[in-house]
Image: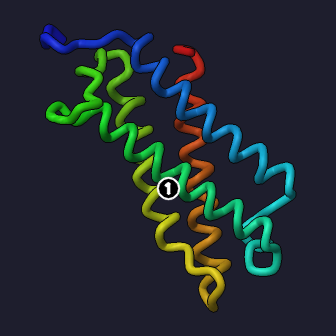
Amino acid sequence: MGEANQTTVAQWASEIAKLRSSYDDMQESWDGATCSALAVPDAPDCSALMVAMGFTAQTIQITVDGLQEDTGPNYLGAAPDEIVALLAETTEAARASADASLAVSCPGADCVGTAFTFERTWGDLGTSLAGWEPYL
């Protein structure tokens, strides 16, 4: 606290709300197509959706990192103490999901395993983004 670039919870929540909207849109498409990691190898629509979800995870990760990079053009300011832990959780979940998306190896012998890992980290990202609900 006390830092010159201190921001409010509402400012952070506003930024996270945009990212959550993108996440929710992709999750709705995934659920609507009744996709799963097991379906990815045999269902072109699910495979395409997983690629799009990967891009969404990467965008969320880049955005969240950028908002915290104090020398970057998108720096939002220091997060209030009230949300520091939640922001750290969201940052870690976004990085894990983005990394897992890059490791998806479909088609291929390891397709289901890598798709499952991504699907799990994607779900963790959703759980973290949902943690912002009290602030939205």
In the displayed structure image, the side of residue 136 where residue 44 appears, left or right? right
Count of picture labels: 1
Q: Position of residue 104 (x, y in %)?
A: 55, 73
In the displayed structure image, the side of residue 58 where residue 5 appears, left or right? left
Viewer-side residue, 131 vs 33: 33
Q: Label 1 is placed on what type of residue?
A: Ser
Image vertical order of residue 85 relative to residue 51, above or below: above
Q: Position of residue 29 (x, y in %)?
A: 78, 48
Residue at position x 47%, y 43% from top? Answer: 60
- Quadrant of the snapshot with the N terminus: top left
In the displayed structure image, the side of residue 44 where residue 16 appears, left or right? left
Residue at position x 56%, y 48% from top? Answer: 124
Residue at position x 63%, y 71% from top? Answer: 115
Q: Position of residue 101 (x, y in %)?
A: 52, 64
Q: What kind of colouring is applied to the model shown?
A: rainbow
In the displayed structure image, the side of residue 61 where residue 106 appears, left or right? right
- Quadrant of the snapshot with the C terminus: top right
Pointer 1: residues within 10 angstroms few (<14), some, or many (20+)? many
Query: SS for tag 1?
Result: helix
Image vertical order of residue 12 relative to residue 114, above or below: above
Residue at position x 62%, y 64% from top? Answer: 51
Image vertical order of residue 15 relative to residue 34, above or below: above
What residue is shown with label 1? 97
Viewer-side residue, 43 vs 117: 43
Image vertical order of residue 29 relative to residue 105, above or below: above
Image quadrant in which you'd find residue 9: top left
Q: Position of residue 135 (x, y in %)?
A: 52, 14
